[in-house]
Image (cartoon, grey):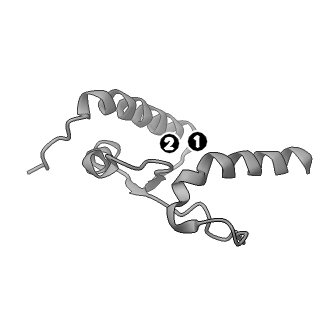
Amino acid sequence: HHAPRPAPEPFVSPILSQLSLSLDYLASKHGLKFDHAFLMGVGAGASHWSTYAEESLRLKLVSPNPFDGIVLDKGVDPSNATRQLVALGAAIAGMEATI
């Protein structure tokens, strides 16, 4: 028995289908095996479709804290790390470009 489908299913389903095709391609072309995927920057509504996404992709979705392993300045509030993902990504890209 499957859980009831979330309301955004018609919008999420095509995206999940494309992700599934990409994962299947990578698995067959490069012999890779996937058991989880990172779910980054998704806030409101994720709980309504994440179970459906896990079933569709046959993967466990993991929401890591992007601040893990980073020493933060005193002024940075780590309580809602996903709000800082764009800034963090830009900072990392900037550091890589200058190295």
- The percent coordinates of residue 13 (x first, y second) are 30, 31
Is disc 2 placed on a helix, strand or loop? helix
The quadrant in which residue 78 appears is bottom right
Q: Residue 53 appears at what percent x and percent y?
A: 32, 44
Residue 75, numbered circle: none
Q: Tell me what residue is drawn at x 68 percent, y 67 percent.
A: 75
- Count up the numbered dots: 2
Closer to the camera in the image, 32 or 70? 70
Identify the residue under disc 1: 30
Is the residue under label 1 in contact with that under label 2 (CB below 8 Å)?
A: yes
Where residue 70 sits, quadrant-wise, is bottom right
Which amino acid is tagged 2? Ala
Looking at the rendered structure, the kind of residue marked 1 is His
Expressed as whole percent of the image width and height from the top left, the position of residue 52 reads: 26, 45
Q: Give the residue drawn at x 51%, y 67%.
A: 79
Task: Read off the residue under disc 2.
Answer: 27
Name the residue rendered at 53%, 48% in the picture.
Answer: 32
Residue 86 is left or right of residue 33, and the answer is right
Instruction: Give the side of residue 16 with respect to residue 74, left or right.
Output: left
Q: Residue at x 67, y 48 (%)?
A: 87
Q: Is residue 50 left or right of residue 90?
A: left
